Image (cartoon, helix red, strand yellow):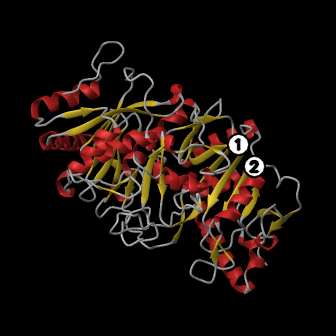
Amino acid sequence: MFKQTAPDGSLHDASLAVGAMADNGSRGDVRVNAPTAFLFAEALRRGEGVVAANGALRVLTGERTGRSPRDRFIVRESASAPHIDWGPVNQPFGQARFEVLWDRALNHLFQRGDYFTTHMRAGADRQHSIPLLVMTEYAWHGIVAQQLFIRPSDPHDRTGEWLVVNVPSYTTTPKIDGTASDGAVIIDLAKRRILLAGMRYAGEMKKAVFTVMNYLMPESGVLPMHCAANMGADGDVAVFFGLSGTGKTSLSADPKRLLVGDDEHGWNEQGIFNFEGGCYAKCINLSRDKEPVIWDAVRFGAIMENVVLDDSHNPLYGDSSITENTRVSYPREHVERRVAENAGGHPSAVMFLTCDLFGVLPPVSILSREEAAYHFLSGYTALVGGTEVGLFHQVKPTFSACFGAPFFPRRPAEYAKLLMEKLAAHDTPVYLVNTGWTGGGYAKGGRRFDISTTRALVRAILQGQLQNVPTERLPGLNLTIPARAPGVAPGVFNPRETWREKAAYDEAARKLIGLFNENFRRFEVPEAIRKAGPDLAGLT
């Protein structure tokens, strides 16, 4: 049995509650802060996965090979309720009902026998971080917790500890538990608890913790960001906002730059800091040539989810027969070129990554402050690669406020206000980068921008090579585009010129602009921001 004593000598409330229940019903052993090698061996012994030829552990996550938004809830209680943007993304869950479900799930875990606990932290900035006690039924989930969160420098400092309980074998019953299906992710902000029931996909655990961070950080004036970040040799920091599939991880894993992190960061008065201690990369079509940093990171200590293996256990990264959302998690230590501090200064450039399936947006646009606010609130992209349950082999447009609405519990305007304050305070330039289609839409004759083109544009942005070149204003889209950039073919900057049928482009542009306008009606913003977006009246 484990117990955790706080610095003042008192027993932490979360640990006390769990410890008492475990004493009453646990049949097995609790492994506390077990090393990765031990957890790896345990996962194999228990049949949780198999060893791939590259040394990583391959696991399968069952029917859910992505996040399940309809199964995510936040406990509705008086302190946090006024600050939550309630709706289909942030669904309320009753306090009394959660208490019953929490006890039932924990008792199930203790009755099962052995389980694993790991003390970690979220947030590389010591002032803006939270301690975590992660309890997992599966050994491999314990490895993921050690990879994706941050090992505490002082394991005895557990002030304000959050308890994360992951019980995949406990299936919920909607009529009894009040859930939407046989699984649920429920966040209790008041009592600092997260319950994952019936969920094998490791992304749910990671994203639940960062939803908590995204709720807490604005109270301290910190902007939480769904973004990747890296640093150049001179200390210049690049930030890449974007939903899964837009290229955050691939672009941040640049062999010529130092990695800060690939998914979640905060922006405070000193600069940016990583929320994580590792990476959670998509690996569909992974190749050594295009993504050497990620390729080399997939070795012993990494966990591959739903990757198909051949008879010799070699990964078949191009095989999407299980899911297009194949994943690999690994610690930052697997990346040789990384920022040791897991943090950096204020961004030299902010890039909004969008995967435009209409083939209408240019490869890069230079945004004004008002345009940045408009596109941050819009969060336009395409859902690719089955990141969410039910999106297998689907590609469709979506608008996700702050480029990560499923993980931001507060109202989007609150995060947008913080972003605008940071941009103004540090005079940070912002760019909209299209990593999607050009010359036509998805499945309509277009082609997706290759990563070498996007990397060349990113280099041009970071070297200031787009600041003093001739520009052109695109009517309707209301976007300013550069005339050229080093290493990029000159004919790709104006998207209309890449289409053979100009009338077809105009039709696609009208459709996309209409979607922008329809989505943005829900936001109450200054007129200058509203007018900074696409406008059908601007098309001839």
- Residue nearer the viewer, 142 or 76: 142
At numbered mark 2, what does the secondary structure look like: helix, strand or loop? helix
* Quadrant including the C terminus: bottom right
Across and down, in percent, residue 470 comes to: 89, 61
Residue at position x 51%, y 38% in the image: 275
* Quadrant including the N terminus: top left
At numbered mark 1, what does the secondary structure look like: helix, strand or loop? loop
Neighbor class of circle 1 (other Cα within 10 Å; few <14, some 14-19, many 20+) is some
Q: Quadrant of residue 420?
A: top right
Across and down, in percent, residue 88 comes to: 41, 57
Residue at position x 35%, y 12% in the image: 8
Across and down, in percent, residue 134 comes to: 32, 37
Q: Is residue 320 positioned above or below 23 on the image?
A: below
Across and down, in percent, residue 421 comes to: 68, 38
Residue at position x 41%, y 50% in the image: 90
Q: Quadrant of residue 353?
A: bottom right
Question: What's the residue type where badge 2 is placed?
Answer: Leu
Residue 532 appears in the picture as rendered: no
Which badge, 1 or 2, is on the more N-terminal residue?
Answer: 1
